[in-house]
Image: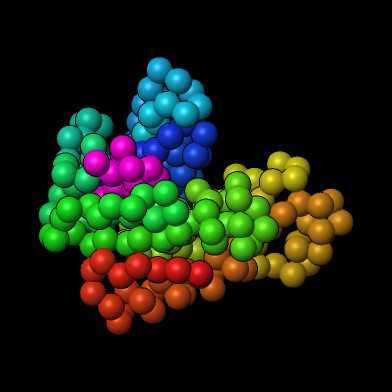
Amino acid sequence: MQNEVQFAGFGGQGIMLMGQIMAQTAMQQGHEVVWIPSYGPEMRGGTAYCTVVISDRPIGSPIIRNPKHLVAMNRPSLEKFAPSVKSGGTIFINSSIISIDAGRDDVDIIKVPIIEIAKELGNVRTANIIALAAFVSRSQVVDFELLRESVKAKFANKENLIVVTNDDNLKKQCELFEVKYVFSDLTDFARKIKAYSESHDSGTILGP
């Protein structure tokens, strides 16, 4: 089976990072993976998107015109890429800055106000990780616990950023070095998304 995920938004929203973490998680699961980045003319504020192809067999072509899933972090990306998502796929919408719908009734829609949630958690820079966690929890494209480990590994050597962990001892060490961590809250958030997905139809708007 093959899954294709397109992450799209403005430069500076952490689009490439989301794709990298997704790709790393899929590799940890033993899948064949391709990660393809694409930038607009501006590195920050311009268009940025990447595609992650995940398969249980060798990938014949990394060029995907109709991905199964879309993570849209801004309105231009939603308008541009939503029509090309395969029927039965998932479209994640950053409802903090996107006020329109995807215009599709044949895909699973998840709307999450990631910026408000990130602010509530104390660090707006975590918005892309919240989006990634929400999307994976809903779509189950990769294993959620392995995703957690991939995020943890990605930020392990970074100071004053994010450490993703549920380990109380590591949390205490992080506090000593003033490193922010958020994943305990994200885990609870992910459980909430799963509960919503089991009890609500497509199009549910999720909030903190």
Residue 35, image x and y in percent? Answer: 37, 35
- Farthest residue in the front direction? 99
Q: Is residue 35 left or right of residue 59?
A: right
Question: Is residue 71 highlighted in magenta?
Answer: yes
| Residue drawn where x is 32% and y is 74% of the image | 197
- Residue extending farthest to the right is 176
Q: Total marks drawn?
A: 0
| Residue displayed at 74% across by 70% down | 168
In the image, is 56 to the left or to the right of 113? Answer: left
Residue 201, quarter of picture: bottom left
Q: Position of residue 69 (x, y in %)?
A: 26, 50
* Residue 39 position in % (x across, y down): 39, 24
Task: Residue 138: give x, y in percent of width and height.
Answer: 35, 65
Q: Nearer the viewer, residue 66 or 120?
A: 120
User: Is 178 a magenta residue?
Assistant: no
- Using residue 150 as the reference point, say whether residue 50 is left or right of it: left
Question: Compared to 51, does 43 lie above or below?
Answer: above
Picture quadrant where residue 80 is located: top left
* Vertical relation: 99 (above or below) 169: above
At 42% from the left edge and 49% from the top edge, which residue is drawn? 97
Range covered by the magenta-colored residues: 69-79
Whether residue 81 is visible to the viewer of this picture, yes or no, is yes
What residue is at 26 percent from the left and 66 percent from the top? 203
In terms of depth relative to the viewer, which is nearer, 58 or 87? 87
Q: Residue furthest top?
A: 41
Residue 157 showing in the rendered view:
no
Quarter of image, res 66 = top left
Going by the image, does 156 lie left or right of 203?
right
Q: How is the image coloured?
A: rainbow
In the depicted structure, whether residue 199 falls above or below residue 73: below
